[in-house]
Image (cartoon, grey):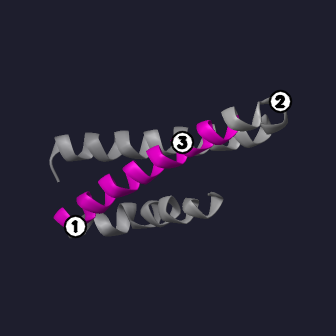
Amino acid sequence: MSDGNDTLRKNLLDQQERLFQQLADLEEIKEEMDSVEFEESKSETLEQIADIAASLEKMVAGNLSLTDQIGSQKQVCYSIHYYR
């Protein structure tokens, strides 16, 4: 795998972790937020997670050697849709 692919994969996984933390933070402060604001923020975060899942899927499809490295992360992204 090229250095560019390594960097892209790392950036996607880092962003994914930040979004999962953001989602957890939103749940913690849910009671302090207006319900519309909370739902919009949550929806936007989930949409970003779905975008990352799609990017990871493309990477896996393009390079099967990535399957073991990011396949489990991709599954986590897809399972996040249960929050919706």
Q: Which residue is mark 2?
A: 32
The answer to if 19 sits in the magenta stretch is no
Prevalent SS, magenta region: helix
Residue 63 falls in image quadrant: bottom left
Residue 21: x and y in percent read 62, 40
Determine the residue positioned at 45% across, 44% down: 48
| 33 sits to left or right of 4 | right
Residue interval drawn in magenta:
38-63
Q: Is residue 25 visible?
A: no
Q: Residue furthest right?
A: 31
Task: State whether residue 12 is above or below residue 59.
Answer: above
Q: Which mark is residue 61?
A: 1
Secondary structure type for disc 2: helix
Inter-mark Cα distance, 1 to 2: 42 Å
Quadrant for the C terminus, please.
bottom right
Q: Which mark is residue 45?
A: 3
